[in-house]
Image (cartoon, rainbow, N blue to C red):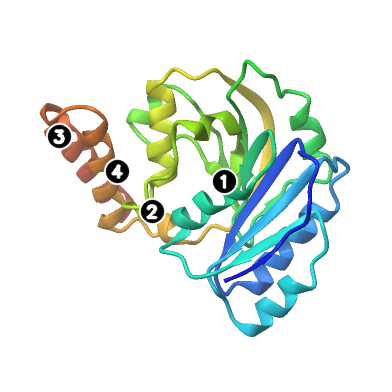
Amino acid sequence: MFILTSILIEPKISIIIPVLNNLSGLQKSIKSIQIQTFTDFEVWIIDGKSSQETQHYLQNLKPPFHFLSENDTGIYDAMNKGISLSKGEWIYFLGAGDCFENAQILKEVSTFFSSDIKIVFGNVRYKNQQFKSSFSRLLWIKNSMHHQGIFYQKLVFEKHRFTTKYKILSDYELNLKLLIDKVTSKRILKTIAFCEDFGVSKKYDWSLYEEEIAIKSDLTTVAFYPLFLILGLFKFLFKKI
């Protein structure tokens, strides 16, 4: 295990970037952070023991960039480690290769932070698509919240963490739990980040829908399983057409 950090004053935002052998994507993400006009943040890069080239890059970073490099069991294990290390009042997760939409976005989003609001969320942009987030009962139908579009008050994670048994949709499970808890939220009409349009959750293979069905069933009752199964099958077949 290698960890680089320093004594920090508590920042407003902790940005957590899980990464494994994606140096070019990581550099792209970091550049979008470095140009932010808002600077009251720290960045924790949670590296799953990447190549020597990535290690060398990480070791040359300066505060407010910090990193932990050790083996993990997957992206959600890495994100949980980032939560434990973070000191910020608000937490944001950025995928390696994904970028903030513009240099002012953190400054703009920070104006909506409030102690009585637990999540602040906006939209996410793909190359050919705009993902419009919705924290509502629509979540029971589809994953209508993109974790690159959400800022969580850290207090949220005193009760919840990402469930590592789910490898693709643990962030979806977390957001459903928060919906069930009726946490206070604020939707802002801004695009938070630009995201790559590839990855496990974008392959739309059956394992994605299996997890979705299991998550919904675990959070309700077995009686709803047939409904969730039919909905999952319909969405799977629709994506395959």
Gap between marks 2 and 4, in whole Å? 9 Å
Which numbered disc covers residue 225?
A: 3
Mark 2, other Cα within 10 Å: few <14 / some 14–19 / many ≥20: many
Q: Callout 2, which amino acid?
A: Ile
Q: Callout 1, which amino acid?
A: Ile
Q: Compare marks 1 and 4 and give the one earlier in the sequence.
A: 1
Mark 4, other Cα within 10 Å: few <14 / some 14–19 / many ≥20: many
Q: Callout 4, which amino acid?
A: Glu
> Which residue is the site of mark 4?
212
> Which residue is the site of mark 2?
168
Residue under the image location 64 percent in, 46 percent down = 86
Left or right, residue 216 beside residue 196 = left
Quick one: 56 or 184, which is closer to the camera? 56
Q: Mark 1–mark 4 contact, CB under 8 Å? A: no
> Which residue is the site of mark 1?
83
Q: Nearer the viewer, mark 1 or mark 4?
A: 1
